[in-house]
């Protein structure tokens, strides 16, 4: 509830401000009571009891009804609410809607009042014409608005003293002149065509806002209502023009319009005007032409506000706006502040990728010099997203969205630079977002499956282990491999639940596998652990529970952890790994060689297996270009691992020569497409039961030979 004294205080301020702006017949007490009631209505709207814009329109119209018809009354009213409106409740948005409603309601009511007055004058003139020439002259001369008469050839017959005074000239100076002699460069395109239609009898009425040049060189804006006067038998006799002086009203309107479409801090066009300009361009320009945007954001602006204060931050924005305005001096360019520390430059003429990136370079060059304020130099830089598009088919919101996305590409690539929009990259990121949003529900919907890829002993050719690889059967994108969604799962935190599910499925499946040969154990199952899982304090308990529920021996489970996940990790994570290893679970370091490669730290890890990344084994394929170098690296890694008591598995084996060279270098096992691709669980049993050959060979080939 707003205190009554607050409402009364605002009403008194309003009464004082509006007292001398218009002539009204109210006593001071009556005026006080009237404005107090309007203030109560405004307070109710600001508190949410009714729509602020609707309430504002009603108040504006009521002011006109109460004879507060001078534009100064509106200006005083808006000023009072700008200064004191927050005392009545509501926020900035509600107060802005109320003020806008007052201005709109006032303007509409004043226009209707003026039109009614003009119609009364016109009717009186017609009636006077019918009764007597003398009475017509009396109405013509005494009218409070400007009146002009022209014959059907467009020659001025007479103007009244009111119109002559408005224009700063005498009535005699207009008689006999053609109406086209009062043309102005600002006249609407259709004005003279419409007046010609009136003279030809093709229409009876036309209204327009028109500018005139006064004798002293100043501008007079009028609302012109032109109509045809006919005689008693309906013949056209004269063209009658009624001219209302709207200079002050238009000035007020332009002032309000400027406030609504320009940023108060920098003076630049704001988001509203920018979109109006862009929409107008896209709606009128040649569809084959191109439009470009440079969307920029200051780098580190938050730090300026946090350390130097918002006053300095505001001055920095003003300085940046000034430099951007200088860059926008070329034809076809518009720069606007979109909010906060974001600005945009529109290139409307001959825009293409080259001109757009050149403009981005201009912007970055303009901002390389520090902004000086109060004897202090503030360094500034920006990141710029650049997008160019054919006008045909372009949509304002989509263009700005694309430029905004590209801006953050520039920031991600190091700041202080521009990035050019790439439709394929954008589509990829949209897909990435779509997948990220769908991940939590996908596990519940049962969209994930596990495929299995054999790992082959390079000495015996037997399947020594099988790696579990999760897949996502997405309803729209089909079967997705881990590289499409594991990173997203880690970012969203779903990786913990997903990893637990994969572990459960893999252990349950591995518990059913038979031995690969007489006297041998069933193959182990390798399950990947994500970084977040290694930090989960419940990991050990969950692993032990899954092993107990599925009946899988701990020695048959091998947990794969990437090198970067364990090198430099906290002691707590190492304790988890040590506890698992102590219970018999084997630990494998995956993708070895691609992370920190801290060899001294490697000996502290409770690991049993090192998996050499495919990037190091690729050169060992037939025809490989880096075979000698890769051979040296792999040999060193094998020697290191064996020296630490670990076995070595090579990844990415794709041909026979590669398998043979790895075996010669001492690798214990290998996996890759040469042996077998990952297959669903129901196809794995056939590969595990194959006889062991004398040398490693593709498992599918062995199936054919069996």
Image (cartoon, helix red, strand yellow):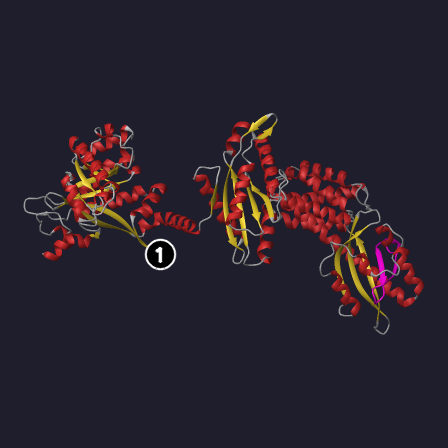
Q: Is residue 465 visible?
A: no
Residue 537 horizontal side relative to residue 134, left or right: left
**Residue that protrudes farthest toward the top in the picture:** 375
Looking at the image, which residue is at 55% across and 27% down?
308
Residue 303 horizontal side relative to residue 604, left or right: right
Looking at the image, which residue is at 91% across and 67% down?
131
Q: Is residue 684 visible?
A: yes
Quarter of the figure with the N terminus = top right
Q: Residues within 10 Å of mark 1 (few under 14, many from 20)?
A: few
Residue 335 is inside the magenta segment? no
Return the residue nearer the eye: 299 or 614.
614
Q: Is residue 561 above or below residue 701?
A: above
Residue 315 placement (x, y as % from top left):
60, 32
Which quadrant would residue 318 be assigned to in this image?
top right
**Residue that protrudes farthest toward the left in the picture:** 518
Residue 146 is inside the magenta segment? yes
Residue 324 placement (x, y as % from top left):
59, 40
Looking at the image, which residue is at 78% across and 43% down?
31
Residue 526 placement (x, y as % from top left):
20, 43
Q: Is residue 272 above or below residue 311?
A: below
Residue 305 placement (x, y as % from top left):
54, 31
Q: How many marks?
A: 1
Determine whether the residue tagged by mark 1 lies in a helix, strand or loop. Answer: loop
Q: Which residues are magenta?
A: 143-162
- What residue is pinned by disc 1? 476
**Residue that protrudes farthest toward the bottom in the picture:** 233
Quarter of the figure with the C terminus = bottom left
Residue 320 horizontal side relative to residue 620, left or right: right
Which quadrant would residue 312 be assigned to in this image?
top right
**Residue that protrudes farthest toward the right in the picture:** 134
Return the residue nearer the eye: 292 or 352.
352
């Amino acid at each position: 509830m707003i205190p009554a004294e607050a409402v009364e205080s605002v009403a008194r301020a309003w009464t004082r401000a509006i007292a001398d702006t218009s002539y009204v017949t109210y006593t001071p007490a009556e005026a006080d009571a009237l404005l107090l009631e309007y203030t109560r209505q405004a307070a109710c709207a600001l508190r949410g009891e009714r729509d602020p814009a609707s309430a504002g329109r009603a108040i504006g119209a009521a002011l006109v009804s109460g004879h507060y018809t001078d534009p100064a009354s509106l200006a005083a009213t808006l000023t009072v609410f700008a200064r004191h409106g927050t005392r009545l409740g509501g926020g900035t948005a509600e107060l802005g809607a109320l003020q806008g409603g007052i201005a709109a309601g006032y303007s509409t009511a004043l226009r209707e009042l003026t039109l009614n007055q003009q119609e009364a004058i016109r009717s009186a003139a017609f009636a006077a014409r019918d009764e007597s020439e003398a009475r017509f002259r009396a109405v013509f001369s005494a009218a409070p608005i400007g009146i002009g008469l022209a014959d059907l050839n467009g020659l001025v017959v007479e103007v009244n003293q009111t119109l002559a005074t408005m224009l700063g000239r005498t009535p005699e100076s207009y008689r006999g002149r053609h109406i086209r002699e009062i043309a102005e460069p600002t006249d609407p395109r259709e004005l003279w065509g419409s007046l010609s239609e009136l003279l030809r009898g093709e229409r009876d009425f036309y209204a327009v806002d028109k500018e005139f040049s006064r004798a002293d060189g100043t501008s007079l804006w009028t609302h012109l209502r032109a109509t045809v006067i006919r005689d008693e038998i309906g013949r056209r006799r004269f063209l009658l023009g009624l001219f209302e002086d709207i200079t002050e009203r238009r000035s007020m309107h332009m002032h309000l319009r400027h406030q609504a479409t320009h940023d108060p801090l920098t003076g630049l066009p704001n988001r509203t005007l920018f979109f109006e300009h862009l929409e107008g361009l896209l709606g009128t320009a040649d569809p084959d032409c191109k439009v470009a945007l440079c969307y920029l954001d200051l780098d580190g602006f938050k730090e300026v506000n946090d350390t130097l204060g918002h006053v300095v931050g505001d001055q920095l924005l003003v300085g940046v706006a000034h430099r951007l305005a200088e860059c926008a001096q070329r034809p076809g360019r518009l720069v606007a502040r979109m909010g906060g520390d974001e600005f945009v430059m529109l290139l409307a003429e001959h825009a293409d990728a080259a001109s757009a990136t050149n403009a981005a370079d201009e912007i970055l060059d303009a901002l390389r010099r520090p902004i000086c304020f109060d004897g202090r130099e503030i360094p500034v830089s920006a990141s710029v997203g650049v997008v160019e598009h054919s006008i045909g088919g372009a949509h304002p919101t989509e263009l700005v969205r694309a430029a905004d996305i590209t801006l953050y590409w520039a920031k991600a690539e190091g700041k202080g630079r521009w990035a050019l929009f790439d439709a394929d990259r954008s589509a990829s990121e949209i897909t990435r977002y779509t997948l990220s949003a769908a991940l939590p529900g996908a596990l519940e919907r049962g969209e994930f499956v596990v495929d299995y890829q054999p790992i082959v002993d390079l000495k015996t050719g037997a399947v020594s282990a099988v790696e579990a690889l999760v897949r996502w059967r997405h309803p729209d994108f089909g079967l997705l491999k881990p590289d499409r969604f594991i990173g997203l799962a880690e970012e969203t935190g779903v990786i913990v639940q997903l990893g637990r599910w994969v572990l459960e499925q893999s252990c349950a499946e591995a518990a059913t596998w038979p031995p690969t040969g007489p006297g041998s154990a069933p193959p182990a199952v390798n399950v990947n652990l994500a970084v977040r899982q290694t930090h989960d304090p419940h990991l050990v308990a969950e692993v032990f529970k899954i092993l107990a529920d599925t009946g899988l021996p701990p020695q048959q489970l091998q947990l794969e952890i990437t090198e970067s996940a364990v090198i430099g990790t906290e002691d707590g994570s190492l304790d988890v790994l040590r506890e698992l290893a102590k219970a018999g679970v084997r630990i494998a370091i995956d993708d070895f060689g691609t992370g920190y490669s801290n060899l001294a730290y490697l000996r502290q890890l409770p690991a049993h297996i090192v998996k050499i990344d495919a990037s190091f084994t690729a050169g060992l394929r037939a025809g490989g270009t880096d075979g000698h170098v890769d051979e040296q690296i792999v040999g060193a890694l094998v020697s290191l691992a064996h020296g630490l008591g670990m076995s070595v598995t090579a990844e990415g084996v794709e041909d026979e020569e590669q398998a043979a060279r790895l075996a010669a270098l001492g690798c214990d096992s290998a996996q890759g497409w040469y042996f077998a691709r990952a297959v669903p669980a129901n196809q794995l049993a056939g590969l595990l039961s194959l006889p062991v050959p004398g040398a490693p060979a593709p498992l599918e080939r062995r199936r054919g030979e069996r």
